Image (tube, helix red, strand yellow):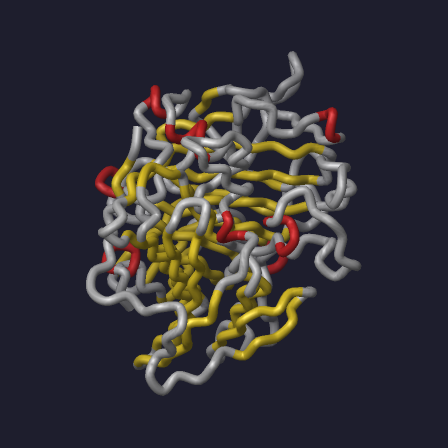
Amino acid sequence: MNLPLSIVMTGTLITATAVASGADAAKLRTMHSQPSYVVATKQVEVAVTQLGGHMAPVTFFRDSAQPVRPYHITPWQDEKPSKMPAPVLVTLRGDFFCLPFGGNSEAVSGEKHPPHGEIVGDAWKFVGTKKAGDVTTLTTAIDTKVRKGRVTKELSLIDGQNAVYSRHTIEGFAGRVPLGHHATLAMPEKEGAVRIATSAFRFGMTCPSLFSDPKQREYQALLPGAKWTDLTKVPSSWKGAADADLTRLPGRYGYADLIQLANEPWEKTGGPAWTTATFAEAGYLWFALKDPAVLNSTVFWMENHGRHGHPWNGRNNCLGLEDVTAYFADGLAASTRENLLTKEGVATAVELTANKPAAVNYIQGVAKIPAGFENVRTLEFTPGQVTFVSTTGQRVTAPVRHEFLKTGKL
């Protein structure tokens, strides 16, 4: 089963060697061992690595007494370089766009992609920076070889806002493919300190395949292939053990697990699909907004010191909240054939056309919250604004141009 992308870019596309008229070159700085393009406003500073296009560190509220850096930087980034099992691990940090999303261990029609695709491990070219009104945009691009095409990354900031607007335009990469964002948050060590909430979903499923392999000194705690409808009641692998509450993370120290939620459509929920992570003790929440017609699922990668091989060495603690159209993290082969999700009517691949560029629009940001906020109950969308309503009845409104998800324009 495949899903056509509903947001299409038309007109002339900027090339990888062109620079926007009058734009200054982005500042290039080494950030946690990786040369990175840096773009900023008074409120937000974004670094995106040349290698792989990984977005982190990102500093929100940089003009305040308490700036926020929510994204994970893997612990080996500042160590002496060593050979990695996959190119994506060299820079692994923050958010990055994956094409094809997943492990890609199996060749398909002669194509053999690296984990999460070439674009997460190869070099991106600088295209330009520009300022148009209150919008500042950094543009980079990459040409793919395994399946010919080009991906153009536009990261935009708006003066006075604490949000990052991402637009990835895909040209020439024809055929069916899983894709998505791989946002990865830094997690505190205190169990249950971060509260998770999402927009309505049809059902959730625990990864049916072996996600963490004990032969590789990796361990998982959730029951493989279980289907459920409540994030607070996810079955454990052990008979008689209490269900896991995935709205309170981190949990299950020493384990690494993967689940996927099938989001309800925009038409049913009356607005974008969303995910939030509330860091109450730190006084903020992180959010992601998307069009579920383009990215129809959310994958949770809960890595709580559960992998002990190189380069993990039992020290990695992070939370991936990955908005995708894909079959878990299994990659191209599993996502483009019939599987457990397509049997439930959930598309796990999109159909790309060589002569019709397609775009994926996405928004991530941070909002400060008052004491007692606890967790998000729902989001309310009004023109140019999002209101986060807490389980305790508190309301926080932030300027966010969520209309971008449909229009691709700011």
- Give the x, y percent position of residue 172: 31, 51
- Give the x, y percent position of residue 211: 60, 29
**Which residue is at a point 47% across and 81% down the rendered structure image?**
25
**Which residue is at a point 76% across and 52% down the rendered structure image?**
82
Q: Is residue 52 left or right of residue 31?
A: left
Q: How many marks?
A: 0
- Give the x, y percent position of residue 342: 35, 24
**Which residue is at a point 41% across and 43% down the rendered structure image?**
179
Q: Is residue 187 left or right of residue 151?
A: right
- Give the x, y percent position of residue 251: 66, 36
Taking depth in this image into account, of 305 and 33 the one nearest to the observer is 33
Q: Quadrant of residue 254?
A: top right
Query: Is residue 160 visible in the rendered structure shown here?
Result: no
**Which residue is at a point 39% across and 83% down the rendered structure image?**
23
Hey, which residue is sitting farthest front in the picture? Answer: 110
Hey, which residue is sitting farthest bottom in the picture? Answer: 22
Query: Is residue 374 visible in the rendered structure shown here?
Result: yes
Indicate whether 101 appears above or below 65.
above
Query: Which quadrant is the C terminus positioned in?
Result: bottom left
Query: Which quadrant is the N terminus positioned in?
Result: top left
Q: Is residue 379 left or right of residue 257?
A: left
Indicate whether 407 appears above or below 339.
below
